[in-house]
Image (cartoon, rainbow, N blue to C red):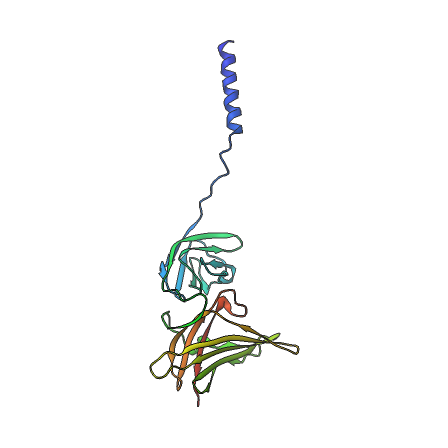
Amino acid sequence: MNRPHILCILLFATALFESCSDFGSEVIPVPLLGIEPNSGRIGSVVAIHGAHFKASASSYAIRFLGANDTLIPDSSSESTIYTFVPFGARSGSLEIYSNDFVGITGEFSVILSPDPNALTLQPYDISPPITAKDSVVVDRMGISRRWRMDFQGDTVHLSRSYSSGEEAYEYHVVLLDQGPGQLPRVVSLWIRIQPDYPGYWIDPIPVGVLKLQQYDRHGVIAGRFFGRPSVSRMRNGSFTIWAENRQ
């Protein structure tokens, strides 16, 4: 066989080999998003930085490792979305989604995580401090609904109700006073749902952490509750309390 024929065979074999080789699909790098700070407790505010957060905050979903559902951001801009560390979160990277996958952050460390299987109470340790306005819900009639405070012996009953138009909701928090200078104990939490037809039902909240900013039976009881993000009728599984003793 002459040299030209040998060269043609070699070129054909090379082309055939390359066409049959499978080097896999193109690897697209995962966008790495910034996170600040890189550690925090349950309830701590977290800022996630990226190049193109152009949609509204409600268009994004944030997943913390260990949390049983995603969170809706509290707010957003073109470069940053803000959220908080949810109850049940564990240390690890955060994933951010919109219509599809957006990106992943670096490692985030969850510190001093409360018991994930119980209702607990802790001194307030998140910022910025809450105000009375943060706890108010404006119902469909335009009426501002606030928390009330009731007592029966050592029991402190906090409650707030409002109507969405189709259903009426009552949030209930029961504390047991432990005496002067002591934090109370959480006894129970639940939501009572009253639809626009006869009957009602109770959604108990068996786990979570209540962080108290202020505890004064004769003045103001204020704090924020963090439950599982999947709890229905609670945005991100959280709500704010501000109840004043008006007696």
Which residue in the rendered view is the most extreme toward the top?
Answer: 2
What x and y, as percent, mark residue 133?
Answer: 44, 77
What x and y, as percent, mark residue 101?
Answer: 50, 52
Which residue in the rendered view is the most extreme toward the right?
Answer: 197
Which residue in the rendered view is the most extreme toward the left?
Answer: 181
Is residue 168 left or right of 102 when viewed as pictured?
right
What x and y, as percent, mark residue 45?
Answer: 39, 65
Is residue 232 left or right of 74 when viewed as pictured?
right
Q: Residue at x 38, y 83 (%)?
A: 216
Q: Residue at x 44, y 52 (%)?
A: 104
Can the viewer see residue 176? yes
Can the viewer see residue 147? no
Give the tally of numbered discs.
0
Q: Is residue 23 above or below residue 12?
A: below
Q: Is residue 147 above or below residue 52?
A: below
Q: Quadrant of the C terminus?
A: bottom left
Q: Is residue 154 above or below residue 202?
A: below
Q: Residue at x 51, y 24 (%)?
A: 15
What x and y, as percent, mark residue 4?
Answer: 50, 12
Viewer-proximal residue among 202 and 245: 202
Viewer-proximal residue among 205 and 160: 205
Viewer-proximal residue among 145 and 94: 94
Q: Residue at x 52, y 64 (%)?
A: 230
